[in-house]
Image: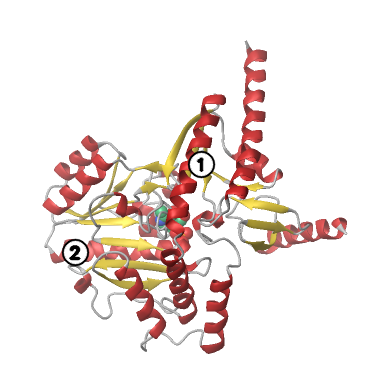
């Protein structure tokens, strides 16, 4: 039996290599189904999911209410287009605004598309303010997506390399460095149209933005009549212990981009445009065929309803304390674990060794995590994960860390 299923993975790999472009480096696993916090591969081997498809399936897999919402909407209507009104889109927009700040919403299909519009809004704002060559600022370790403008505002050089000249009038600020932030606003005085930041840098290595830095960013953008754009594509929808990451600071952004967990795995993106700025988007300035389709709207509405209604954020905060306590104990035990960072269930472990090998060993042992920024293991379990599975997952992780810690000691002895 297992031989047959093993052949199945080999078949999938062969077909993938033959027919899909080679832009992804994949792990040697194909998942067949998921239940709650568990994933099962082609051999029905179980894995604890500490990744949520990169902060997407925040309610775990196959939540009955999400499935019901999708099924009942599928019975009614998939798509009609933005030529017409949509009850589902209006309901979701209302729920988003009621749970965040006074704004209006545009719906699209992914994070990069949401940031694409945020960038266009920044340009529209700069031009409306008669700025000469409006500048958009972002953070040096940020990640904002893969379209040309999302890629250009992405600070990480490796993402931008190899595509020739990108968009002009963009500059990068060192995260949590208030001198770098102040210097950029001084350098481009009268020209800063927007500053975009993730409240916790995700792909760049789970780096929480300090209160001091964020508060200065809010002040400078206000003083300079620049937009403060929060990219909450990874931090939004409960991941950090608040519904949105900006709530950790005592202010609101002007524009917020969302995607990933908003749709529980159904593709969606959203841009929330503060009331003061929504008039920048007049008919013809932007659009999307699929954006706002009935299926995505219905599923996202259900997702939001569950997260707000099921006391999930309290659970996240209780589990977060548990995670950080356990992980900080591991830090004291294993030298290779340098730092434990993050907020809520958006957690990064920074190692003295390369992280991909740790992620692969965790996978072999039935725990799904992922490596980012070279040395960081990212932990993003479902927000409703049970304490039993957290304990099981953490003990797999600790065994793996212990193994690498032992190996690194043996290596250093043999070197000296
Ligand atoms: N912004 C942030 C903070 C992200 O983490 C990501 C994806 O990882 C994106 C934007 C791009 O989103 P998408 O992959 O949906 O285009």
Q: Could you say where residue 129 lies in the image, as x and y percent from the top left?
A: 12, 63
Callout in the foreground (2, 1): 1
Whether residue 143 is visible here, answered yes or no, is: yes
User: Would residue 363 appear left or right of 203 to someone viewing this image?
Assistant: right
**Callout 2: SS:** helix
User: Would residue 214 appear left or right of 160 to someone viewing this image?
Assistant: left
> Disc 2 and disc 1: Cα gap in Å?
42 Å
Q: Quadrant of the N terminus?
A: bottom right
Whether residue 145 is visible here, answered yes or no, is: no
Q: What residue appears at the point 24 percent right and 40 percent down from the top-left corner? A: 212
Residue nearest the viewer, comparing 403 with 65: 65
Tell me if mark 2 has few (under 14), some (14-19) or many (20+) residues whose alpha carbon lies within 10 angstroms of its own.
many
Note whether 232 is above or below 320 in the view shown.
below
Q: Could you say where residue 77 lies in the image, as x and y percent from the top left?
A: 51, 87
Circles 2 and 1: CB distance less than 8 Å? no
Q: Quadrant of the C terminus?
A: top right
Specify the label residue 244 is tagged with: none
Which residue is denoted by mark 2 in the rendering?
125
Q: What residue appears at the point 79 percent right and 61 percent down from the top-left corner? A: 8
User: Would residue 180 appear left or right of 186 to someone viewing this image?
Assistant: right
**Disc with the residue nearer the chain's start (2 vs 1):** 2
Q: Could you say where residue 71 lies in the image, as x and y percent from the top left?
A: 57, 80
From the Cβ of disc 1, is ligand 1 less than 8 Å away?
A: no
In the rendered image, the residue lying farthest to the top is 416
Q: What residue appears at the point 41 percent right and 49 percent down from the top-left corner? A: 160
**Callout 1: SS:** helix
From the Cβ of disc 2, is ligand 1 less than 8 Å away?
A: no
Q: Could you say where residue 103 lies in the image, as x and y percent from the top left?
A: 25, 69
Which residue is denoted by mark 1 in the rendering?
323
Kindly indicate the quadrant of the structure image that contains residue 414: top right
Q: What residue appears at the point 58 percent right and 47 percent down from the top-left corner? A: 390
Ligand 1 shown in quarter:
bottom left
């Amino acid at each position: 039996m297992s031989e047959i299923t093993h052949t199945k993975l080999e078949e999938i790999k062969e077909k993938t290599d033959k027919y899909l472009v080679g832009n992804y480096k994949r792990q040697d696993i194909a998942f067949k189904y998921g239940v709650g916090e568990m994933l099962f591969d082609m051999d029905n081997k179980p894995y604890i999911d500490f990744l949520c498809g990169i902060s997407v399936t925040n309610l775990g897999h196959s939540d009955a209410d999400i499935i019901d919402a999708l099924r009942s909407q599928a019975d009614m209507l998939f798509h009609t287009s933005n030529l017409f009104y949509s009850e589902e889109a209006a309901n979701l927009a209302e729920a988003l605004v009621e749970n965040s700040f006074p704004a209006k919403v545009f719906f699209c299909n992914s994070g990069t598309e949401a940031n694409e519009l945020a960038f266009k809004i920044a340009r529209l704002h700069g031009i409306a303010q008669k700025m000469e060559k409006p500048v958009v600022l972002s953070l040096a370790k940020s990640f904002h997506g893969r379209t040309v403008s999302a890629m250009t505002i992405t600070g990480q050089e490796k993402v931008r390399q190899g595509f020739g000249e990108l968009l002009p009038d963009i500059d990068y600020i060192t995260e949590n460095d208030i001198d770098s932030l102040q210097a950029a606003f001084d350098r481009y005085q009268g020209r800063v149209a927007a500053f975009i930041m993730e409240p916790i840098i995700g792909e760049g290595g789970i780096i929480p933005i300090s209160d001091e830095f964020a508060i200065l960013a809010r002040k400078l953008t206000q003083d300079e009549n620049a937009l403060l754009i929060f990219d909450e594509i990874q931090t939004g929808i409960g991941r950090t212990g608040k519904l949105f990451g900006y709530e950790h600071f005592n202010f609101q952004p002007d524009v917020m981009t969302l995607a990933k967990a908003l749709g529980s795995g159904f593709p969606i993106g959203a841009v929330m445009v503060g009331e003061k700025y929504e008039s920048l988007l007049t008919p013809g300035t932007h659009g999307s065929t699929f954006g706002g389709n009935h299926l995505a709207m219905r599923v996202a509405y259900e997702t939001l309803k569950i997260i707000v209604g099921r006391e999930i954020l309290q659970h996240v905060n209780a589990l977060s304390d548990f995670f950080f306590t356990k992980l900080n104990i591991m830090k004291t035990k294993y030298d290779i674990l340098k730092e434990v960072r993050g907020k809520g269930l958006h957690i990064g472990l920074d190692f003295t060794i390369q992280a991909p090998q740790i992620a692969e060993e965790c996978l072999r042992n039935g725990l799904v995590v992922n490596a980012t920024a070279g040395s960081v293991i990212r932990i993003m379990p479902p927000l409703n994960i049970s304490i039993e599975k957290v304990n099981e997952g953490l003990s797999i992780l600790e065994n793996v860390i212990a193994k690498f810690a032992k190996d690194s000691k043996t290596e250093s002895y043999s070197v000296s």
